[in-house]
Amino acid sequence: MDRTGADTMGAVTQRSSLSRRTFLRVVGTASGAALASGLLGSCGSGPTASGERVVNLLWSDVTNVRAPLIADFTNATGIKVNQTNVQYNQRLNKIQTAVQGGGDFDVVQMDTVWTARFAAAGWVDDLTSRITDAIKQDVPAAALGAVTYNGKLYGLPLFNSAKHLFYNAKLLKEAGFDHPPATLDEFVAQAKGTTKQGQWGSLWSWKQSEA
C-alpha cells in the first residue's frame, strides 16, 4: 500500500520533479488559462496597459532553484512572471488573504490536501479542457488524481511523493492477522490490533500544517 501526494500549481497545483519540457507546458497551460479568463482562483492580472502579458505566481521557491525554468518559460512564451516566494507554512494564509481581498495571483502552488477545498470554494479554475493528452502522458495518474475534484482537473503536479508501508510480519501474525493491510480500513484495524501498552501499532509522519 502506498500513498501518492502532489504539491500542485492551481491553477496549478509539486517529489519527483517534472522535466523542463513538461514544466514549460504545465505553467503555460495554467498561465494561459489565467490570461484567457482574467481570473484564476478568484484573482488575476492578464495583459498590462502596454499589452505586456504578465502572470503573478505564488509558490514556495525561497532558494530560487527554479529561476532558470521561469527564465526559459518567459523566453519561450513572451509572458513575464512575477514571483512571490513564501515558506510553505505561510502559503495557505497568503492565498486565503489574496482571495478574500480580491488578490493579485494568477497561479498558485497548492498542497495536495487543499485541492478539494479550493475547488469547492471556487478559488481555482477548472483546467480540464486546457490540459492535453500529451501533458497527461507525462504525469503519473495518481499525481493527477491529487488535483482532481468531482472529475475535473484544477491543477497540475509540480512534483509528487509516495509513502510506502513497511510492516512487521511477526507482530501482525501474533495479533491474528495473516496478511498486511491492502486498504486504509485494514490499516486502521491492524494498527489498532497491534497496539499494546507502550507499543504503538503504527508510526506515521505528517506536517502539523497538514493535520
Image: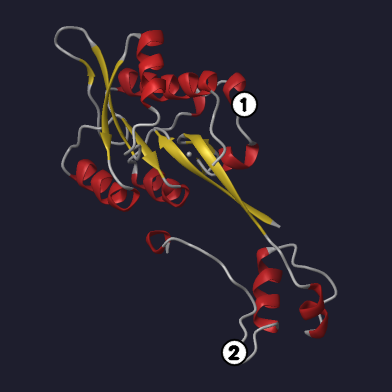
Q: Can residue 87 be seen at all in this image of the molecule?
A: yes
As helix, strand or loop, the secondary structure at mark 2 comes to: loop
Indicate left or right for 121 with 163 as reference: left
Q: Can residue 13 be seen at all in this image of the molecule?
A: no
Q: Earlier in the sequence, mark 1 or mark 2?
A: 1
Is the residue 27 above or below the residue 98 in the image?
above
* 62 vs 95, nearest the viewer: 62
Instruction: Look at 32% across and 41% down and name the residue there.
Output: 123
Q: x, y (%) of residue 72?
A: 40, 15
- In which image quadrant can residue 110 be found? top left
Q: Quadrant of the C terminus?
A: bottom left
- In which image quadrant can residue 187 be found? bottom right
As helix, strand or loop, the secondary structure at mark 1 comes to: loop
Display coloring? secondary structure
User: According to the image, label 1 marks what residue?
Assistant: 138
Q: Label 2 amino acid?
A: Gly
Is the residue 34 above or below the residue 13 in the image?
above
